[in-house]
Image: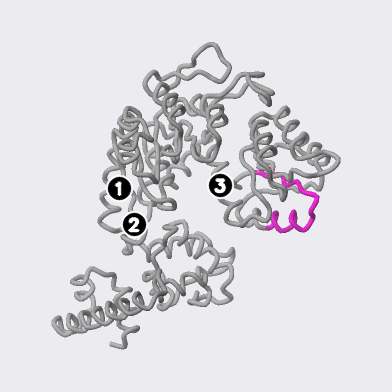
């Protein structure tokens, strides 16, 4: 079980749909159709998260949030509403809500927010079996990739994990920066200590300060209890600062002080607290360029980039795609049914597509295809339309782009044909010479009618 969630909404259809979705994801779910009912259930049973609508009667979601936090300050609360306003959002976050989503929301969005919320909680337990499972899940062998680029990354993080050095992970969204951060942590001497993460770009500056450094009761409107900051929660372990490039200059100064002095001051406090925490930061920005533009502090950049890792986008390491596809097919296998496979045409489309959303987009495409396909073999018809369209037509639909694509394909066809003749039809050798996978070569041969 991944966690216990209490769903609260006066729309019964939404409750039923969302409970089915989340139970399929491995969560234990209970439902309530009002804030009053939800509060009774919450006080009688332990929960890890509450997902609640804001507009309800007689008790609003905001009031449920306030009372739930009074009862258990550690509970994660996610707000959903069809009537979004800045004022309501700020009020919810002030009272301690983790985040809020606007109806109608995408299924992928709520699944991602829930996953991030649970990963941000303190991942620490005295249960030895749980620790073993975490270490196994995040060992380097479970990070998918056989390309030369990924092998170099594995070598580097293997060395980094054995130290207490601060690490900066660069890469586009969806390339797996948090996965690498967890791999470093769970293969280090701090593996039995907390791993805590936060998305620095997801919160306003004052709320981010409260999340990182904590606050004392009464320090601002809505501070109904004293709250530990994530620096303190992660003490002894690892704090993952995702999207650190989104922070303001003022926040950067506070982070620099915390890293240099190894101490923090909660909002409204008069004393400092010593912390011992390893920092792993991540960004999809070019921080060196941001330093030159004076958007990011030079001293903080040097402090967090003692070791830098760069995760390439999926489109430049296509050797890894087939491995990733098979991994996600196993991950989303339907209970009691054999693992699905993909057709040659389908794999060819995966290799042709540019994957602007990187590994995350590939994973979502596989999950969708496994869910929708009625057969044991996934075909191109089971894939999102954008993959079929963009893989075959390219990013641009202009006549010039189509003409260029045709010339490139003709050159590719002739090159494969010429190489095949030179090596006597040895496909393995052709693939090696042309630096492509054997699967990709077979697809090209079939596509070009060679």
The quadrant where residue 302 appears: top left
Given the current orientation, which residue lies at the most extreme bottom position?
449
Q: Which residue is mark 1?
A: 154
Circles 2 and 1 in contact, beta carbons < 8 Å: yes
What SS does tag 3 mark? helix
Q: Comparing marks 3 and 1, which lies closer to the viewer?
A: 3
Give the class, few, some or many, for how many residues have Cα within 10 Å of label 1's Cα (few <14, many ≥20).
many
The quadrant where residue 337 appears: bottom right
Residue 315 in view (yes/no):
yes
The quadrant where residue 167 appears: top left
| Image location (x, y in percent) of residue 396 | 40, 71
Q: Which residue is mark 3?
A: 115
Relative depth, front residue between 164 and 81 = 81
> Looking at the rendered structure, which numbered label has been put on residue 145?
2
Residue 345 left/right relative to 433: right
Q: Which residues are magenta?
A: 4-20
Residue 122 left/right relative to 101: left
Residue in the image at 35% along x and 47% along y: 140
Residue 433 left/right relative to 93: left
Residue in the image at 56% along x and 15% along y: 269
């Amino acid at each position: 079980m991944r966690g216990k969630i209490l769903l609260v909404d006066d729309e019964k259809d939404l409750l039923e749909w969302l409970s089915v979705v989340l139970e399929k994801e491995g969560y234990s779910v209970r439902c309530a159709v009002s804030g009053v009912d939800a509060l009774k259930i919450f006080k009688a049973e332990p929960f890890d998260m509450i997902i609640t609508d804001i507009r309800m009667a007689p008790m609003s979601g905001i009031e449920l949030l306030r009372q739930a936090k009074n009862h258990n300050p550690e509970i994660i609360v996610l707000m959903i509403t069809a009537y979004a306003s800045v004022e309501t959002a700020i009020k919810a976050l002030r009272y301690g809500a983790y985040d809020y989503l606007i109806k109608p929301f995408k299924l992928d969005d709520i699944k991602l927010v829930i996953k991030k919320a649970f990963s941000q909680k303190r991942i620490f337990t005295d249960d030895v079996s749980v620790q073993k499972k975490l270490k196994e899940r995040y060992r380097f062998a479970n990070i998918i990739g056989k390309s030369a680029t990924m092998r170099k990354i594995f070598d580097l993080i293997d060395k980094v994990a054995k130290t207490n050095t601060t690490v900066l992970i660069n890469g586009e969204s969806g390339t797996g920066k948090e996965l690498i951060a967890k791999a470093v942590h769970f293969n280090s001497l701090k593996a039995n200590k907390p791993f805590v993460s936060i998305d620095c770009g997801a919160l306003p500056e004052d709320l981010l300060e409260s999340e990182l450094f904590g606050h004392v009761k009464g320090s601002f409107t809505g501070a109904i209890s004293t709250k530990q900051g994530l620096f303190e929660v992660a003490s002894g372990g690892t704090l993952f600062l995702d999207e650190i490039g989104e922070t303001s200059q003022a926040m950067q100064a506070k982070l620099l002080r915390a890293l240099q002095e190894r101490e923090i001051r909660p909002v409204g406090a008069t004393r400092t607290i010593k912390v011992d925490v390893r920092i792993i930061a991540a960004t999809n920005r070019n921080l060196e360029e941001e330093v030159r533009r004076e958007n990011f502090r030079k001293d903080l950049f040097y402090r967090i980039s003692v070791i830098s890792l760069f995760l390439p986008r999926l489109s430049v390491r296509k050797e890894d795609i087939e491995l990733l596809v098979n991994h996600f097919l196993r991950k989303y296998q339907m209970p009691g049914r054999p693992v699905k496979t993909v057709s040659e045409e389908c794999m060819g489309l995966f290799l042709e597509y540019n994957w602007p959303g990187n590994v995350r987009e590939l994973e979502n495409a596989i999950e969708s295809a496994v869910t929708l396909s009625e057969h044991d073999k996934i075909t191109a018809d089971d894939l999102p339309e954008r993959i079929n369209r963009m893989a075959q037509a390219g990013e641009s639909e202009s006549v010039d782009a189509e003409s260029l694509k045709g010339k490139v394909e003709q050159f590719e066809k002739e090159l494969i044909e010429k190489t095949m003749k030179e090596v006597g039809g040895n496909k393995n050798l052709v693939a090696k010479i042309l630096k492509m996978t054997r699967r990709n070569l077979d697809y090209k041969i079939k596509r070009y009618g060679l």
